[in-house]
Amino acid sequence: MKLKCNVCGYIYDPETGDPDGDVRPGTYFDNLPLDWVCPDCGASQDIFEIIDDDFEEEGGEEDE
Ligand SMILES: [Zn+2]
């Protein structure tokens, strides 16, 4: 399960973690340190929203 920052669009992927933020790969969002914030914009964790696994972050265009 990935999560997206609603402020800047950063995607947190548990498989990747956040090496720059000292978060090891395989760390689920629930297990992040409480003081972890978005590495791109500094938003707090409650800004993040869950995105579906089948959500394509690139090339995905919505039909309207
Ligand atoms: Zn952000």
Image (cartoon, grey):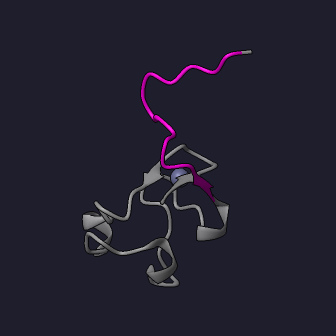
Image quadrant where one finds the C terminus:
top right
Name the residue at 45% across, 83% down.
Answer: 33
- Magenta stretch bounds: 49-63
**Residue 60: image x %, image y %?**
50, 24
Residue 39 placement: quadrant: bottom left
Residue 24 placed where, x, y %?
A: 26, 74
The answer to which image quadrant residue 58 occupies is top left
Q: Main secondary structure of the magenta part?
A: loop
Residue 1 x, y percent position in the rendering? 48, 60
User: Which image quadrant for residue 62?
Assistant: top right
In the rendered image, residue 64 lying in the magenta stretch gets the answer no
Q: Is residue 51 magenta?
A: yes
What residue occupies the far front of the structure in this picture? 54
Pick the front one: 42 or 15: 15
Residue 31 picture location, percent across and down: 45, 82
Q: Is residue 61 above or below residue 8?
A: above
